[in-house]
Image: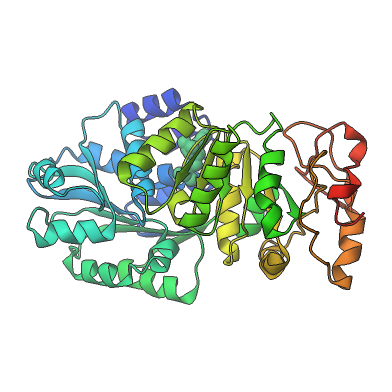
Amino acid sequence: MTSFSDFALLAPLQKALAAEGYTKPTPIQSQAIPHALAGKDLLGIAQTGTGKTAAFALPILHTLGKSGVTCKPRSCRALILSPTRELASQIADSFRAYGKFMHLSIDVVFGGVPVGKQIKRLSTGADILVATPGRLLDLIDQKALTLKDLEILVLDEADQMLDLGFIVPLKRIIPMLPKQRQSLFFSATMPKTISGLADQFLKDPVKVSVTPVATTAERVTQGVMFVPVSAKQNLLHAVLLDPAIERVLVFTRTKHGADKVVKHLVNARIQAMAIHGNKSQAQREKALAAFKEGACRVLVATDIAARGIDVDGVTHVINFELPNVSEAYVHRIGRTARAGASGIAMSFCSNEERPFLRDIEKLTRLPVPVLALPEGFVMTAPPPRLPASEQNRNDGNRGHHAPGRSGERQGERNGQPQRNRRRRSGGGGQGRSSGQFAA
Ligand code: AMP
């Protein structure tokens, strides 16, 4: 399947796709859309960034638009369950963009905001409703919504749903669903717990799978700098002096950590905002909007808050702290490789985080090249002592500068061609010895 016209989507959808500038379906879209249009249940293994939202949104819009049925009060025809508010908002935005030449009503409901307005809006029903599970159940309990007229259900980012403890709400929702329905189920990973959950939602599903974890990682130019925790703030400051870093997502493990990083950057007159679970919805939206518009160059996020953030043109991802769950690393770096683009990810790794780095390399089946510290950066704290087994590795990679967006190919490593692995041109590949561990 090479063109959207092969799907025979309704004309307003084709017009919207042209307006979005989509010329070719992504692999998940090519695989999923024909089955979804045929009314089949679907089990999709795909990560954010693969175009999976359109893979379910386009067939839903087509199917609902074609049937001509209208939604009943306090009811919805398609329901998309999302683990986070950010992802829910973005899914709704995608539906609005793809459905902008149609007359279907699209609504989104999530917790953390007053329920009253949501109840009022739902009184007339919604053709398409995007919801987080907790708020959905609240609305059902308050009789503001019923699922009895549901035609299509989507469960998005199922693995994240379980990570966030949504298993109980999901199990409560299952018996409320009409037996006659189409269900589409997406998850980035498919461990036994997820496939067990999928079995409860799906009937004889078609399985589609794209982008194994390693493939996302391959599209991103990765690098790691070894640095003690105490020097990370200064290192971040030094790294951000590079103007090639136009729009950067910085990841911390904790909300408190995110706030600390922002404070430090703002003190250093670098525009930065944080997005995490302790921020109000309005604060999160403000930060995200500033980041999208380019008014804020650095967005500091925790894993959960960043889930689903869909901002084009993120030039870099910086892992200020490495995640202790390796899948989260792949989700993080995927933010800079949206829809086939390549991106750059740098990680600051302390001695304590080395086991996390090893897990990440095991998962992605890719070694993360060691980068020299930025020119002029002097570490105030002594560098962490490397175990003997790691010495060679650092020596072997000495002199690789932080990767930039332009520059020559890095060449071959271990005899293997390194696709998409670039470094900044110039500089001769030598960092200052005072800042280099291997020196
Ligand atoms: P998703 O995985 O759904 O979060 O989509 C990731 C990004 O890819 C979003 O910015 C979409 O707008 C974009 N996208 C989705 N499908 C296509 C396509 N066929 N062509 C170009 N961009 C796309």
Left or right, 123 with respect to 396, comes to left
Q: Nearer the viewer, residue 211 or 352?
A: 352
The spot of residue 161 in percent (x, y) is 38, 63
Task: Please tell me which residue is depicted at 77% across the width and 59% down the height of the picture.
Answer: 367
Left or right, 189 with respect to 112, comes to right
Q: Quadrant of the C terminus?
A: bottom right
The spot of residue 204 in percent (x, y) is 36, 67
Q: Nearer the viewer, residue 288 or 307?
A: 288
Is residue 230 visible in the rendered structure shown here? Answer: yes
**Image height of 100 relative to 181, above or below:** above
Task: Please tell me which residue is depicted at 70% across the width and 64% down the height of the picture.
Answer: 357
**Image height of 400 relative to 136, above or below:** above
**Image height of 156 relative to 53, above or below:** below
Is residue 335 visible in the rendered structure shown here? Answer: no
Left or right, 413 with respect to 120, comes to right
The spot of residue 41 in percent (x, y) is 35, 59
